[in-house]
Image (cartoon, helix red, strand yellow):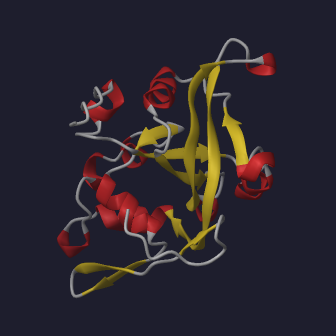
Amino acid sequence: MAKKAAPKSAAAAAAGGNCKYWLLKTEPGEWSWSDQARAPGGGVAPWDGVRNRQAINGLRAMREGDRCLFYHSGAGAASRRVVGVVEIAREWYEGEGEAAGGGAVDVRAVGEFRRPVALGEIKKAAGGGGGEVEGMREFALLRQPRLSVMPVPAKFYRCCHAGEFSQEGGNFVVYFGLQEMAIGKNTTEVL
């Protein structure tokens, strides 16, 4: 029996199709990759405290199993970078306890990049010439830098998941570099 197609959310439609990749920003002084990885239950923790309506709509559009780039934001340009990957472990739910009045999704740590992907590299990937990654010109990280939750172009996610950008002969060469937490070794999976 054929599966029914899941309805597209507003955020998925805005991202240009089946959006299953996201970017979640956090200040490392408030919640860092190390905090996420050390969270109980295998690195599972609520992603809450989001107040921007557009970002909340992104959280509401997430589905269990969606993958998210874990992005450290910060005051200095050197600290702005994608450091790992989390996945949605529990879809949107209304706030409980301290989070009352808001809502959250639960995210599970998947793996940390061997080499984080800096914002400068992301900007280069969006540039013209041979370095453009499909869909990057409309990437919210570059258009709305203060937004904390946003959809990610699938091709960029795959490049970022690889953990390393290299430009050779006008094409992006992908080197696998995500360290999966559950198995403790490098992955060669192309998502």
Which of these two is toward me, 14 or 107?
Answer: 107
Q: Which residue corresponds to the image point at 46% horizontal and 78% vertical from the top-left?
A: 176
Residue 101 percent location from the top left of the image: 68, 11
In this image, 83 relative to 30: left or right?
A: left
In the rendered image, the vertical position of residue 73 relative to residue 113, given as above or below: above
In this image, 43 relative to 10: left or right?
A: right
Residue 34 percent location from the top left of the image: 76, 58
Q: Residue furthest front?
A: 1
Q: Which residue corresponds to the image point at 58% horizontal and 45% vertical from the top-left?
A: 25
| Quarter of the image where the C terminus is located | bottom left
In this image, 60 relative to 94: left or right?
A: left
The image quadrant of residue 57 is top left
| Quarter of the image where the N terminus is located | top left
In the rendered image, the vertical position of residue 89 relative to residue 75, given as above or below: above
Residue 168 percent location from the top left of the image: 28, 87
Q: Which residue corresponds to the image point at 47% horizontal and 43% vertical from the top-left?
A: 145
* Residue 126 seen in the figure: yes
* Residue 28 seen in the figure: no
In the rendered image, the vertical position of residue 94 relative to residue 165, given as above or below: above
